[in-house]
Image (cartoon, rainbow, N blue to C red):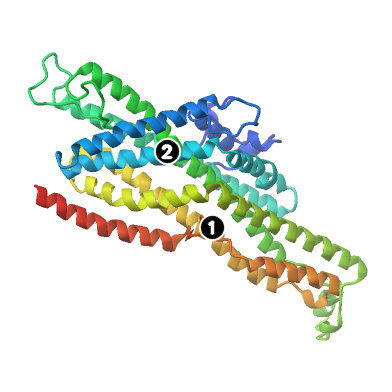
């Protein structure tokens, strides 16, 4: 199942679905699986070894210790701009370490397997013409986001790690005789028992390790988020199809005939026995699909809730620090922190808007249920409409640990607070100078 680079496009026209019979063979899911190889993040059966997952988890946990020690040793000794860099990397390391724990959980494996086998719109493409069109639309969106996030992640990794290499080169640290008082610049700083600031061997060891740890951390950040985005896109697709089916619920043939004849006694018309069977099947399918969406949404809240809560806290803290680093406005700072700031902020904005999209789709569903011609149905089918109406009143907004709603309002609050803290930190940094 190799992926040919010549066949990978940034935008999909749906032609890559030709001949596909299994969900796992869809191109963007194959790309996602390949990227997850870095962290062994693709779900696996319980009997398969998780050694590499445990290895990555321990590695990220251990990396927190020297990073935290560096902060403790240098607080008050180096300027806020330099210290802020390490705060950012330590926080990112902590989030990545928590996500290594997420990947190790049974719920993580179960929810992705369930998504692929039961929820993915590919499994429902033959239900109707509109279901197929929605499947293609969501496929295009998912493919674009997969390529977009991957490219953005690669650009961030390259610039974040190449900038300190260039800074060290510009400072003359790669010469046979480095300038006095000059030191190597690192992407991530650690307190280690050997010299990493002036010794080339120490620098080389830490630099190579930084490349590896940055790749794994970025994968945990971007690709886990991407996986959540794809799940939400498909839930939104189900809600879209569900609303369409309810809005276009067929009326009794007698009513349509009376309407064509311009007769206005349609209130006396009812579905006949054959039509009532079709009505029952349609309502049953709608209730089943909506129950699937509700149940999977609850599974997502249960599996990713605590991860999203900590992630929102990270955005609150890191946002102001990244703005502080970018406020230096020199080329080196913008090259290193600019892409990282864009990635972090766009991840927050994407996450919030995508979850808000899912929540707002429920508003349309409520109106769609009200538009169902229940007045022509028998008592049994009216009860089914009532069940659908009650289910539609349940909010689709996901709450992180049942505390904070993931959506636009939360995003706006985080951004406002980040800018406020940035102004305060900038003032402190100016006073130090």
Picture quadrant of residue 208:
top left
Check disc 2 and report the residue beneath it: 96
Classify mark 2: residues with Cα within 10 Å, few (<14), some (14-19) or many (20+).
many
How many numbered dots are placed on residues in this image? 2
Q: Secondary structure at mark 1?
A: loop
**Residues at discs 1 and 2 in contact (Cβ within 8 Å):** no
Image coordinates for residue 147, horizontal then vertical, percent: 48, 39
- Taking depth in this image into account, of 74 and 148 the one nearest to the observer is 74
- Which picture quadrant has residue 92? top left
| Mark 1 lies on residue | 398
Q: Residue at x 19, y 41 (%)?
A: 75
**Does residue 376 appear left or right of residue 352 in this picture?**
right
Earlier in the chain: of badge 1 and badge 2, it is 2
Relative placement, left or right, of 170 versus 285 is: left
Residue 28 location, quadrant:
top right
Q: Horizontal and vertical percent for residue 247?
A: 69, 67
Q: Position of residue 80 (x, y in %)?
A: 18, 44
Q: Dot 2 lies on which element?
A: helix
């Amino acid at each position: 199942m190799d992926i040919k680079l010549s066949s990978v496009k940034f935008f999909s026209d749906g032609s890559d679905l030709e001949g596909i019979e299994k969900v796992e063979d869809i191109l963007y899911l194959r790309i996602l699986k390949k990227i997850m190889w870095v962290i062994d993040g693709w779900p696996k059966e319980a009997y398969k070894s998780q050694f590499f997952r445990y290895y990555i988890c321990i590695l990220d946990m251990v990396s927190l210790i020297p990073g935290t020690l560096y902060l403790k040793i240098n607080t008050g000794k180096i300027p806020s701009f330099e210290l802020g860099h390490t705060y950012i990397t330590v926080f990112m390391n902590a989030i990545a370490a928590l996500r290594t724990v997420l990947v190790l959980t049974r719920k993580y494996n179960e929810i992705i397997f369930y998504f692929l086998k039961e929820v993915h719109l590919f499994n429902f493409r033959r239900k109707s013409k509109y279901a197929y069109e929605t499947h293609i639309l969501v496929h295009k969106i998912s493919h674009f986001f997969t390529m977009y996030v991957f490219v953005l992640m690669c650009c961030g990794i390259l610039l974040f790690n190449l900038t300190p290499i260039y800074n060290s080169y510009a400072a003359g640290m790669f010469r046979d005789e480095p300038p006095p008082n000059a030191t190597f610049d690192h992407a991530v700083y650690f307190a280690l028992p050997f010299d990493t600031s002036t010794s080339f061997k120490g620098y080389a060891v830490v630099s190579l390790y930084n490349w590896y740890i940055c790749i794994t951390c970025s994968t945990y950040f971007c690709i886990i988020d991407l996986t959540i985005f794809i799940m939400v896109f498909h839930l939104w697709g189900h809600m879209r199809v569900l609303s369409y089916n309810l809005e276009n619920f067929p009326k009794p043939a007698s009513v349509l005939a009376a309407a064509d004849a311009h007769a206005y006694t349609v209130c006396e018309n009812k579905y006949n026995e054959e039509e009532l069977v079709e009505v029952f099947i349609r309502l049953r399918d709608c209730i089943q699909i909506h129950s699937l969406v509700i149940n999977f949404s609850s599974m997502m809240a249960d599996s990713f809730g605590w991860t999203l809560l900590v992630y929102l806290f990270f955005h609150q803290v890191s946002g102001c620090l990244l703005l502080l680093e970018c406020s230096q406005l020199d080329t080196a700072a913008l090259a290193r922190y600019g892409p990282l700031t864009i990635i972090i902020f766009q991840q927050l904005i994407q996450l919030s808007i995508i979850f808000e999209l899912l929540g707002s789709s429920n508003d349309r569903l409520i109106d769609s249920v009200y538009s169902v011609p229940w007045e022509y149905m028998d008592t049994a089918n009216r009860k089914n409409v009532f069940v659908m109406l009650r289910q539609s009143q349940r909010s689709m907004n996901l709450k992180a640990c049942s505390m904070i709603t993931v959506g636009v309002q939360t995003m706006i609050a985080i951004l406002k607070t980040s800018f406020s803290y940035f102004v305060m930190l900038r003032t402190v940094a100016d006073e130090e100078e």
